[in-house]
Image (cartoon, helix red, strand yellow):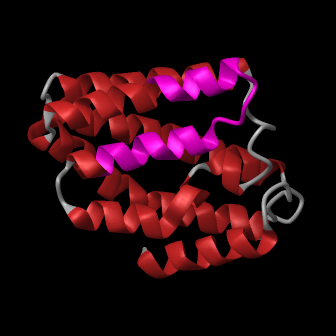
Amino acid sequence: VVSMARLAQRRFRRRGRGHPAAGAEVLLLQHVADGLALDEAEAAALAALRRSPAQEETLLRRHHAVIEALRAGRPTAEADFALHLAIAEATNNPRFVEFLTMMGPAIIPRLALQDGAASDSEAYIARIHAEHGQIVEAIANGDAEAAREAMRHHLRSSQARYRALQRRMPDNT
């Protein structure tokens, strides 16, 4: 997973924002997402058990920052990544933070696959915001299993979005 993550990160940085990904890049990001699903689901569960009150406040602020960015007409992908990073930080395990930091915002499909604003439609962001809300609520309630399942649902939904995009792309090798 780490080697795929590094490759995806290099391709994202080399290509830059605003350039659509080729089918092979979409497949690579899907593979990275498969690996992230395990790590982020466990991170959400650990965050539910280990978060401090200050970390819980940070989670809530970062969750709301996504919608605030949308309402202000700004791209939301970086705020989305900041929320995922806050979940990793709330595990109080530096390895989760190191992994997400290494990956960077490339884990957010709308930033890695196209320009950050292109898929910031209100309906799209509302769906992701609802998924994030379930994760944040479970963490705030200290419910590790619900946090794990909410993150799994969110990541499975993201993977389905990757696959749908891959099917629509002409170069899907």
Q: Residue at x 53, y 61 (%)?
A: 104
Q: Is residue 20 above or below residue 8?
A: above
Q: Quadrant of residue 172?
A: bottom right
Tell me how many marks there are. 0
Q: Which residues are magenta?
A: 64-88
Image-based side of 15 in relation to 98, left or right: right
**Looking at the picture, does residue 149 appear above or below residue 173?**
above
Q: Is residue 66 magenta?
A: yes
| 72 magenta-colored | yes
Residue 51: image location, x then y, percent: 15, 39
Q: Quadrant of the C terminus?
A: bottom right
Q: To which quarter of the image does residue 100 belong?
A: bottom left
In percent of width and height, residue 53 lies at 15, 30
Q: Give how far across and how far down residue 93 sits, in percent.
A: 18, 60
Query: Which secondary structure is most common in the magenta stretch?
Result: helix
The residue positioned 43% from the left and 77% from the top of the image is 2
Q: Is residue 145 left or right of residue 101?
A: left
Residue 17 vs 11, above or below: the answer is above
Residue at the extreme front of the image, as rendered: 54
Work out which quarter of the rendered image holds the N terminus and state it: bottom left
Q: Position of residue 156 (x, y in %)?
A: 47, 42
Q: Residue at x 23, y 45 (%)?
A: 90
At horizontal 58% and vertical 21% (from top left) the residue drawn is: 67
**Residue 27 visible in image:** yes
Taking 116 as reference, is 3 above or below it? below
Q: Is residue 128 visible?
A: no
